[in-house]
Each structure stands twice: as structure tokens, then as C-alpha cells.
């Protein structure tokens, strides 16, 4: 974006008269008489770039929505032309039964006339559809770049981007006006032989009216998908001595699930047949669990008799059997863990303070420490990552959901809602955040800005006390585990 679209030279100046970015060739060819041309740096210093970026993002999102709505209107018009033409054929064929040979000729002439007149309209509508598709593609590309610029801190790049995208925005606003103004009522009128006018009065004419206009797309207009239970898993193993509390769950290769059972001090593997196929007994109670580079997994300790064990992250290998591999010592007590190859992201408590450690998976060396302000976290249970948006989502039993950037910036620290208990948290393949919470107990979708939560599944009774939650990308399902239960439950979008 830092080069002139016309001359391919670097943008160096800003014309205050025309409000446009200039390269040295622009100044010579287009702005020779302009007096208010200033260096780019001076223009950036005098501009509120942050507000302009936000405003431009908002305008582009609105423009994309309008083009998408207009495209849908043109598609409706196209379908209407085709449907009305087919209806006409049905009417003509029915009338033909009583008019005999005369109607044979009428049918042929009318169908030919229909194709002739409708063909022009179909061609125009398809051209409009093509314009809409191109506009949406280009505007979304510009919007993506603006959002990327918005996350950065280079004001000069932001200033250049804003002014470049403004040109794109203005161009497509004019095109949108042309498409909308060109729409309206158009008719396909079939002119029969004069001798048959009276007989054709009952058929009349076909009118195709375009009633769809661009409109704002609000959240209320969108139908949210829901979740339905499609299967149950038996999570009990022969070694168990009490009801299971599956406190961690993670998808693994070959359609397997790895489970951490806190009450039975074990890690289990559930196979494709939905039952436990292997397990290992541990000296400590495992809590959270994540998959590392195959065949390793990482487990953090819920409770152990020794401080050393409580402060470790344990690496296990999963093959035909589960074996203990090694441990990583942490400066503090791990509370929740996630994995972003090759890094472990761990919420750690020490001296009444919760920090986020970024550790290397091999040696546990600290690559980065994020220290959210005090009291923002109290009892973190689970962490889920969105690498695309570079965000960290933390489920805190008491505090709720906290969202941080990878740089440690707090996006939101409290979700507005009536729930009081927060458990497993996961991110699906669309970037939507889901959490197990209560009461009422259920699976909730978290708004992107933390403004609230939408229930996707709720349980009227307390027979299901949800604990861990994970999203399986291979089949787009959610697995939710429960406290004091030998069952886990699989949900899918409906």
C-alpha cells in the first residue's frame, strides 16, 4: 500500500487540497498548482489515525453488508424471472387442451418471446451479480488489511492504508448507487396474434418486481445454530475405584480422545468405539491436559502430597500404552495449560498473583511472561488459544472469562451474564468461543467483545455437572465431560 497505484513510486507527500496521497510524479502531473502539499510524516502527525482506522473499518463492514444484501436481491430477481417464465409455460399448456392446433402455435410463439425478452434481463442481472461478487471480494480484502493495520502500531502505514482504502470505498459506493438505481420493475409482455387477444386476456402478462434493497445486517437477523447430543462415551476404566471426574479432555490422532480423570488419578484413552481402550495410574491427580507434538501430551497436577509435584507439568507419551516421559518444573503452581507449537501457555499462581508463562515444550525455558493486572484472575481452570487472532481465552471459576492478546493486552476481563461457575473453554474452527458454565448448567457461546453469553445447550437438572469442554476439528463436534459421572457427551451443530 505504500506505492502509488498509477506510477508505482513510493508515496511521500499528502495534498491537503484534494485529500490524497502523492508520489513525486503525482505532484508534477496532477498537483502542480496545489499549494498545500506537505510531507507524509507531517500529515501523519496532524491526523488522528486511530480514529480514522476505526471509522474506515466500520464503513467497509457496512459497505460489504450492503453489497451482500444487494447480491441476494439480484439473485432473487433472477429466480423470479425463471419462475415466472415456467409458470407461464404451465398456463399456456393447460389452455392448449381446449384451443387445440391454434394454441400449439400460440405456445411456441409465446415461449420463444419469453426467451427473447427474459434473456436480456437475465444477462443484466448476471452482470450485476458479477459486480457484487467482485466488490465483496475486493472490499473484504481491504477490510482484512485494515484490521491487520489496526492491530499494528505504525501510524505512517495506518495513514497510508486509510487514504488508499478510502479511494476503494468511494469507488464502490458509486458502483452500489448505480446498481440500486438500476433496479426496479420490469415486465415480460408477450404480444400474441390479434385474432387471439380475447382468448389471451385470461393469461395476462408477467411482471417481475425487485423488492429487495440493501439493508443493514444486524445480529438479530442471523439465525444462530444450536447443538444437539449425538453420542455418549463410556469413560470408566477397569482400574477405577470411584465415579469419574474427567477434568481434562483433548482430541488425539486416529480418532482417539485423551482424558484426565482427577478422582481416579489416571489418564485414559477413549477409542473410536467410544470406550476406554488404555490407561495409566498416576501418583498425583491430573487436571488439565493438552496434546503436544505426537505422541506426547502434557498434564498439570490438581493435587499432590508434595510441593514439587504440584509445581510440575508432566509429559506423557501415548502409543499402544501410555508411559511417563519427563516433567517440566515451573516457578509457581500451574493452574491451566494450552499448546501453541512449540510453546506451552500456562497460567501460574505464585504469591497470590496469577501470571501467564510462555514455555518451550522441550526444556521448559521461559520465553515470555505476561502479568495481567492484579485480581483480574483468581482461580483459572482452563486456557484456550485462537492463533489466527493471536488471543488467549481463560476460564476462571469465579471471575468468568478473560481475553488477552498474545502481547498481554486485556481485551475483556468479565463477561456480562448471570452464570456463576465457569469450567472448560474451547474455540471452534470458526473462531467462536464456547464455555461450560452454570447455573443453569450448559454450553454457552461467548460474545467476541465479552458483552454476553448465548446458551447453546442447557440442562434442566443437575445430573450433568459439566467440567471440561473440547472441540474436535476432524468432525466438528464438542465433547463435554462431567463431574462424578462415568459418561461424557458428544454434541454437534444443527
Image (spheres, rainbow, N blue to C red):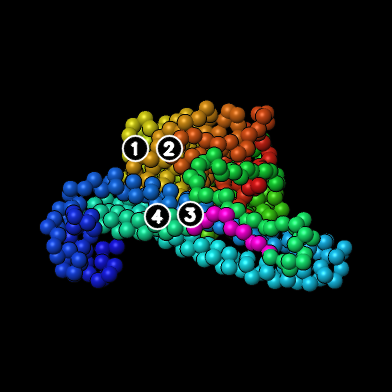
Instruction: Indicate which label's residue lies in the foreground, 1 or 3.
Output: 3
Left or right: 419 in relation to 234: left
- Distance of label 4 from label 2 (alpha carbons): 39 Å
Left or right: 400 in relation to 24: right
Disc 3 residue crowd, few under 14, some 14–19, many 20+, Cα 10 Å:
some
Contact? badges 4 and 3 (CB < 8 Å): no
Above/below status of 72 relative to 131: above
| Residue at the disc numbered 3 | 180
| Residue at the disc numbered 1 | 372
Mark 4 and mark 2 lie on one chain; the one further toward the N terminus is 4
Left or right: 257 in relation to 397: right
| Residue at the disc numbered 2 | 402
Mark 4 and mark 3 lie on one chain; the one further toward the N terminus is 4
In the rendered image, residue 190, in percent from the top left (x then y), is placed at 68, 64
- Distance of label 1 from label 3 (alpha carbons): 50 Å
| Residue at the disc numbered 4 | 173
Q: Give the SS element for disc 2.
A: strand
- Distance of label 1 from label 2 (alpha carbons): 10 Å
Amino acid at each position: 500500500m505504500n506505492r502509488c497505484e498509477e506510477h508505482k513510486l513510493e508515496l511521500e507527500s499528502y495534498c491537503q487540497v484534494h485529500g490524497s496521497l502523492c508520489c513525486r510524479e503525482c505532484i508534477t502531473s496532477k498537483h502542480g498548482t496545489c499549494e498545500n502539499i506537505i510531507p507524509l510524516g507531517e500529515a501523519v502527525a496532524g491526523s488522528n489515525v486511530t480514529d480514522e482506522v476505526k471509522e474506515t473499518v466500520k464503513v467497509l463492514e457496512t459497505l460489504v453488508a450492503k453489497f451482500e444484501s444487494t447480491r441476494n436481491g439480484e439473485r432473487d430477481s433472477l429466480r423470479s424471472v425463471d419462475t415466472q417464465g415456467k409458470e407461464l409455460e404451465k398456463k399456456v399448456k393447460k389452455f392448449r387442451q381446449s384451443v387445440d392446433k391454434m394454441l400449439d402455435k400460440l405456445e411456441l410463439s409465446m415461449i420463444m418471446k419469453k426467451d427473447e425478452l427474459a434473456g436480456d434481463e437475465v444477462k443484466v442481472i448476471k452482470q450485476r451479480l458479477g459486480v457484487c461478487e467482485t466488490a465483496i471480494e475486493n472490499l473484504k480484502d481491504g477490510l482484512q488489511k485494515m484490521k491487520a493495520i489496526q492491530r499494528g502500531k505504525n501510524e505512517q502505514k495506518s495513514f497510508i492504508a486509510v487514504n488508499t482504502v478510502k479511494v476503494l470505498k468511494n469507488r464502490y459506493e458509486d458502483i452500489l448507487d448505480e446498481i440500486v438505481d438500476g433496479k426496479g420493475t420490469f415486465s415480460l409482455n408477450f404480444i400474441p396474434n390479434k385474432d387471439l387477444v380475447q382468448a389471451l386476456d385470461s393469461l395476462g402478462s408477467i411482471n417481475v418486481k425487485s423488492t429487495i434493497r440493501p439493508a443493514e445486517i444486524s445480529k438479530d437477523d442471523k439465525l444462530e445454530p444450536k447443538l444437539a447430543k449425538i453420542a455418549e462415551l463410556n469413560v470408566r476404566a477397569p482400574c477405577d475405584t470411584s465415579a469419574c471426574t474427567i477434568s481434562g479432555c483433548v482430541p488425539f490422532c486416529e480418532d482417539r480422545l485423551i482424558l484426565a480423570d482427577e478422582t481416579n488419578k489416571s489418564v485414559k484413552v477413549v477409542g473410536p468405539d467410544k470406550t476406554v481402550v488404555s490407561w495409566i495410574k498416576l501418583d498425583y491427580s491430573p487436571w488439565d491436559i493438552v496434546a503436544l507434538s505426537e505422541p506426547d501430551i502434557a498434564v498439570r497436577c490438581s493435587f499432590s502430597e508434595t510441593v514439587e509435584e504440584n509445581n510440575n507439568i508432566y509429559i506423557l507419551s501415548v502409543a499402544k500404552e501410555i508411559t511417563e516421559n519427563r516433567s517440566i518444573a515451573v516457578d509457581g503452581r500451574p493452574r491451566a495449560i494450552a499448546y501453541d507449537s512449540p510453546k506451552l501457555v500456562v497460567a501460574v499462581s505464585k504469591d497470590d498473583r496469577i501470571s501467564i508463562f510462555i514455555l518451550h515444550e522441550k526444556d521448559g525455558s521461559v520465553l515470555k511472561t505476561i502479568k495481567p493486572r492484579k485480581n483480574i484472575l483468581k482461580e483459572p481452570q482452563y486456557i484456550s488459544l485462537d492463533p489466527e487472532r493471536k488471543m488467549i481465552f481463560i476460564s476462571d471459576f469465579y471471575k468468568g472469562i478473560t481475553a488477552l492478546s498474545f502481547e498481554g493486552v486485556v481485551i475483556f476481563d468479565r463477561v456480562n451474564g448471570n452464570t456463576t461457575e465457569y469450567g472448560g473453554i474451547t474455540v471452534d474452527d470458526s473462531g467462536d468461543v464456547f464455555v461450560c458454565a452454570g447455573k443453569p448448567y450448559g454450553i454457552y457461546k461467548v460474545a467476541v467483545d465479552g458483552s454476553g453469553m448465548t446458551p447453546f445447550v442447557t440442562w434442566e437438572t443437575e445430573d450433568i455437572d459439566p467440567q471440561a469442554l473440547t472441540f474436535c476439528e476432524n468432525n466438528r463436534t464438542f465433547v463435554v465431560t462431567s463431574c462424578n459421572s462415568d459418561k461424557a457427551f458428544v454434541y454437534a451443530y444443527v
